[in-house]
Structure formats: structure tokens, C-alpha cells
Image (cartoon, rainbow, N blue to C red):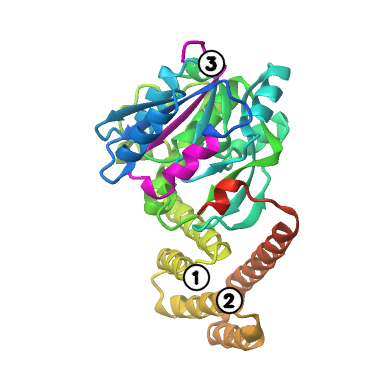
Amino acid sequence: MTETPLISVVMNVRNGEKYLGEAIRSILDQSYRHFEFIIINDGSTDGTRSILDRLQAADERLEVFHQKPKGIYYSANRGCRIAKGKYIARFDADDISFPERLEQQVTFLEAHPKIAVLGTAIIRIDESGTPYKTYTPPTEPSQVKAAISCWDAIVQPTVMMRKDNFLAVNGYREIYELAGDWDLWIRMSEQFEIANLPEPLIYWRTHANEVTNSDVRKHTIYSLIAQRAAGIRTKTGRDPLENVDAVSPELLRQLGISERRIQKGLIEGYYLRAHSMLNAGKSENARYFFDQMLAECSSNILRKRIASLFGEAYINAYKNKGQFVRNCMIFCWAVFAKLSYVGVLLRMKSRFYYLNRTAMRNQNQLGKTEKRPTHCSQK
């Protein structure tokens, strides 16, 4: 491109050939046209390179950089620092942008100069591109700031941010293997305002091989590091990660992250992934994560057996509502087999039932009101 673009879209990818072409087309077909699209190929060994080279030859806005495997956040930093635009729009290789995404975000940021990072709501889709749930994060800067230290209130591939603000906090921390985007949003929220648009502008894909599902323990540890470091900065004004080159058991001890806290985080992480897979119609994947959650709960064989019966009953109930009464009877039998677990199992029962009902209701609503972009129908 001869002119300096206002927006730089940055994507890093490793072995993403399955959805890559669809993701790239959703950016190239944006209603807003004045942008560059930087893609870092982080040592892919599948057909990613050939897809990128072919698409680059067809559109001058596309700039591809191939490298040996360096990691998610090294690649993201490289792309963001190469970017020439005033704004950096992040994107992932398995998602789909609405055609008006860039236009709506840049219009908002131009009108609100105090906002440094702008995300959006999302519509979740399954592996085939079928929508099944809408997620709307907090929108106002005060709401996002209150939530961001507790949970990831910004969805990474929806983000458009000001490059100078990104550089002011030194970008992504490369000691992270996962959850580094959450750490970045927390640090940026400490200095700048962050917001979300309430409209969904991304189709966010859920599948069994997505990065955060590949190593739940690692993701949990890095998420806890981001949270604890933020808490220490708030209390003391000191950044405990400022001169840290790598994550180690000693660092976890210094941050006060015990094995028990990691175990609690794992249970929460496995549960959330089980529910996500359940909503996406991936019952076998949901059961896998549920079993992993049970393995962390206790070494008590009976407790595992009771909870396994409960989990299987409710996953089956979700798949076949006609068996709901029978599955409730199985659940009741399991509870009475060990009364000391009544409270735990009833809480799990009520939460699973509520979430499953909500998922089915959202899916019905999507079928009536949401429109898929042309990219979804091209699968």
C-alpha cells in the first residue's frame, strides 16, 4: 500500500488451515476498505503457508510474514509493532468478522478519544459455523474496569486498540504462553479506558482444538498469574512481573499461588469448558472436561461415581429431553447414596439445568433473529 492506513488488522496463526481462508475473506470483504492486514505465520507445518501466499498475491492489503515457531505473544507483538495504522484490530484465524466490524469500531474510537481498547459482543458458532449463543460483555468503561481483574471481559479477536496506548504498556508479555491477552487488557485498563460495543460484530468459533482447550492447567496458571500480579500492582504500585523472564514454581510462590488455588482454578476451568462444549453440541468433549473436573475434585471414588452419574444424566437430558424425569431419578439415587454431597450436587444440578435451558433459549432466539454472513454459508 502506498498510503498510510488508518487501521492495521493483525493476526498470528500456526497450523490454522481449516478455517483460515474463511477468516481472511471476512476481513478483506469489510465495508471499510482503508486498512492493511498483517499476518504472522508462526512456523505452521500444514497448508497455512500456501493459503497465505495465494491470498497475498491476490490482494495488496495483505502482508504475510513467515517465521520459525516463536509463540503466540512474540508473534502478536511482532505484528503489532510492524503495523503502520493508528488503530490495531486483532483477529484470530478461526473466527469470522461481520462486514461492518471495522467501520463501526473506527467510527466509535474516532468519536471517543479517551477509549484505548474497544471490544464487541460476539455470537458463538460451532465448528460448522452454526450460531448457538450470543455473549454480551460489559460495555461501559467503569463496568469493564470493575470486571477485568476478575474475568476476561474483553474477547481478544473483537479488539480494536490505539497503537500508541499498546506501545505505552510495552505490548504483550512474552513470558505468557496462554492468557497473555487478559494480562494486556488488565494493564491497559490501569492506565486507559476500555469499552465494548453491545452489538455482536464477530462470529467466535468454539471447537475442541482451540488454544485455551489444549492445556487447561497451563491456561489456569497463567490466568492466576495475571490476576495476582494485578492485585499486587493495585496494592503496592509495584509490578511483580517487571523483570521476570520466565514462569517458575518460585514465581508462583512469590505471587502466593498455591497448588490448592490452582486446583480450584482447574475445576472452574474444566467446568466452563464442559459447558461451552455442551452448548456447541459436543457432548463427548463436554464429558471429557467434566471427567477432568471430577478428577480434580477429590480422590474419593464414591464422590467421583456420584458426580459422574449426575453429569452423564444431565448431558443426556440436554440431548434427549424425553429422558429428563428418568435422569432426575438417577440423580436422586446418587445423592441419597452419599448424603454429605447433597449441597454440592444440588448446586451443580441447578447450575447445569439453568445454563442448558439458557443455551437452548438463546439458540431458538438466534434462529429467529440473527443473520449469518455470506462467509458462513460458503462452508
Magenta highlight range: 1-27
Q: Earlier in the sequence, mark 2 or mark 1?
A: 1
Q: Residue 254: tell me if it is visible.
A: no
Q: What's the distance in space between the residues labelled 1 and 3, CA to CA?
A: 45 Å
Say if mark 2 contacts mark 1, CB within 8 Å.
yes
When the figure is inspected, residue 105 is found, relative to residue 24, above or below; the finding is: above
Q: What's the distance in space between the residues labelled 2 and 3, CA to CA?
A: 49 Å
Q: Which mark, by number, is residue 5?
A: 3
Location of residue 131 in the rendering, given as x and y in whole percent from the top left corner:
61, 56
Q: Earlier in the sequence, mark 2 or mark 3?
A: 3
When the figure is inspected, residue 191 is found, relative to residue 147, above or below; the finding is: above
Q: What's the distance in space between the residues labelled 2 and 1, CA to CA?
A: 8 Å
Q: Residue furthest front?
A: 58
The quarter of the displayed image where residue 192 is located: top right
Location of residue 106 in the rendering, given as x and y in whole percent from the top left corner:
65, 23
Q: Amino acid at mark 3?
A: Pro
Location of residue 136 in the rendering, given as x and y in whole percent from the top left corner:
68, 45
Q: Which residue is mark 2?
A: 319
Neighbours of disc 1 within 10 Å: few (<14), some (14-19), many (20+): some
Q: Secondary structure at mark 2?
A: helix
